[in-house]
Image (spheres, helix red, strand yellow):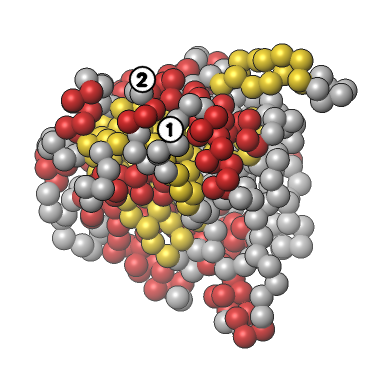
Amino acid sequence: MALNRLRQLSSQLTGSSSSPPKGGLEALTQKSPDDVVFTMAARTPLGRQYKGQFKDVPIDELLTATFKAAIAKSGVNPKIIQDVIIGNVQMDGPNYYGRAAMLAAGMSHETPIQTVDRFCSSGLMAVSAISNRIRAGEIDIGLAIGFEHMSQTKPSAPGKMTEGTMCCQEAADSTMPMGWTSENVAGDYKISREEMDKFAFLSHTRASKAQQEGIYKDEIIPIEISKRDPKTGEVVGKVLVTTDDVIRHGTTLPALLKIRSAFPQWAPSQTTGGNASQNSDGGAAVLLMRRSKAEELGLKILGKHAGTATVGVPPRIMGVGPVYAIPAVLRQVGITKEDVDLYEINEAFASQYAYCIKVLGLDVEKVNVNGGAIALGHPLGATGARQVATGMAELEKRKGKVLVTSMCMGTGMGAAAIFVRE
């Protein structure tokens, strides 16, 4: 797709030349017994890849701990959960890990499990898949888990592809390292290094402030993991983890501007370790059910899932995904961007984050208000579910109504979802 066509489509999708949506906020906030609601949205603490609090914790132990914490937080008998879907990107044999972890956590063998992988949206896809099963009448209650242990898995990458496939330019672009797509977005749309670092600085400072003020406590479920001897690796006890160790307190803009580029082969190269999402370990969980089921169980309803949209974009600029996904989901549920109280947009790279904010015309004071992936890290499969926990906790504090979550995805895609606070 030519760049001018891309810009034209962006303008159309953001509403500058389209008719007002049908339905509106009043219709969106109406309640029905068949609504898909959630009674829990929480995340584990996050750990820095290779250097953080989970680096020596085996995959199955961290996943089991995530399940245990989620079940405890949910307040329901796990035997009534009718399906579990995990969003994950990098685990080998994810269904084996997931099945073993849920059973070890005390769930019934009668409950089935599935793993979904749609790159960075995998956690959101787990939420949407459970929601869709409830809407279809197949189940009444299900658990969505987003999970990634990047310290214990290898980065996913395509195998060698044939010449017949790679002769298609967009096919070749879809295998491009995602950091290169950040450089493409910065170059194509004239996003400067200084602008990228300013957005990164905002993320770092917001996350630092949020942690210091205890804001994350409402979204974090503590997890218990094994304590190991640093020399022998032997288990010597248990430790309860309650906070993130990924946040880089004291980050300054001058320091960010001095960081060397990650891709020196690009000229100019503007993506750095300071203005891109860091890799991290952790999970998140969302318990969804039909409204009538939640009322039957006497559970407090936090909100409802109103809809999800997924789109495709040119692979070489995959970071622009939210520019298309957000307007698509707004149209789907019949509201405008002005009806949204908070946005959680994944900060894969500052270049694409800055571009999405500018093109969509969003108020940055409504977006990632407690920091995003540049500061908190981006545990690939967990992020889509983590955004729900983070966004809904803040929405509750502000007594707002509408949350939009969104992210770009590897190979050139975008996703967005809308959640409405009860």
Where residue 420 sits, quadrant-wise, is: top left
Q: Amino acid at mark 2?
A: Gly
Seen from the viewer's position, the closer of residues 245 and 65 is 65
Relative to residue 3, is residue 253 drawn left or right?
right
Q: Position of residue 360 (x, y in %)?
A: 36, 52
Q: Residue at x 35, y 69 (%)?
A: 8
Q: Which mark is residue 145?
A: none
Which residue is labeled 2 in the image? 75
**Can I make out residue 352 in this image?**
no
**Residue type beneath disc 1:** Ser
- List x then y, in percent, for residue 57: 70, 30
Mark closer to the observer (1, 2): 1
State which quarter of the image contains the C terminus. Answer: top left
Kindly give the residue lying farthest to the right in the view shown: 231
- Tell me the SS state at disc 2: loop
Q: Is residue 82 above or below residue 235?
A: below
Using residue 194 as the reference point, say whether residue 4 is left or right of it: left
Q: Quadrant of the N terminus?
A: bottom left
Do callouts 1 and 2 mark residues in contact (Cβ within 8 Å)?
no
Q: Position of residue 12 (x, y in %)?
A: 29, 64
How many angstroms separate mark 1 from mark 2 (CA)?
16 Å
Instruction: Please name the residue that numbered disc 1 is placed on.
Output: 108
Q: Residue at x 68, y 52 (%)?
A: 155
Identity of the residue drawn at 18% across and 50% down: 334
- Badge 2: residue crowd in 10 Å (few <14, some 14–19, many ≥20): few
Q: Quadrant of residue 223?
A: top right
